[in-house]
Image (cartoon, rainbow, N blue to C red):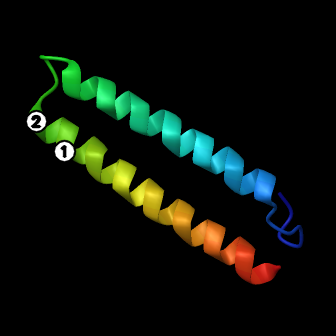
Amino acid sequence: MPANKPLTKADTVALWHAVDAYTAQVKILRTLPDVPPAELAVEQQRVQQAKQALRKVNALRKQAL
């Protein structure tokens, strides 16, 4: 995406769907018996970082309106 193109609501919705899908995958990981707790903790931390980043992007988009 060119730097001069504004961030749209559709962009943030697409990101939300991606983060939601990743969250669902991590929830499934929790149900698997052979996933090491350390790996699960890393994935849960990544989900939290992705959610925080999504909130920041959404706030930036709203500021640009």
Which one is nearer the viewer's eye here, 3 or 49? 49
Residue occupying the point 19% across, 37% down: 39
Q: Which mark is residue 7?
A: none
Local SS, label 2: helix
Q: Amino acid at mark 2?
A: Pro
The reply, left or right, for residue 50 in relation to residue 26 is right
State whether residue 20 is above or below residue 5: above
Q: Residues within 10 Å of mark 2 (few under 14, many from 20)?
A: few
x and y percentages locating residue 46 in the rendered image: 35, 50
Position of 52 with respect to 44 (left or right) is: right
Q: Residue at x 79, y 51 (%)?
A: 10
The quadrant of the image that shows the N terminus is: bottom right
Tag 2 residue: 37
Tell me: residue 32, above or below residue 16.
above
Above/below status of 40 relative to 10 = above
Q: Quadrant of the C terminus?
A: bottom right
> Which residue lies at the image location 13% right of the left edge and 17% below the top edge?
34
Residue 8's spot in the image, x, y percent?
A: 81, 61
- Residue type (three-letter) at the residue carrying disc 1: Ala
How far, Cα to Cα, is label 1 from label 2? 6 Å
Q: List the residue tagged with mark 1.
A: 41
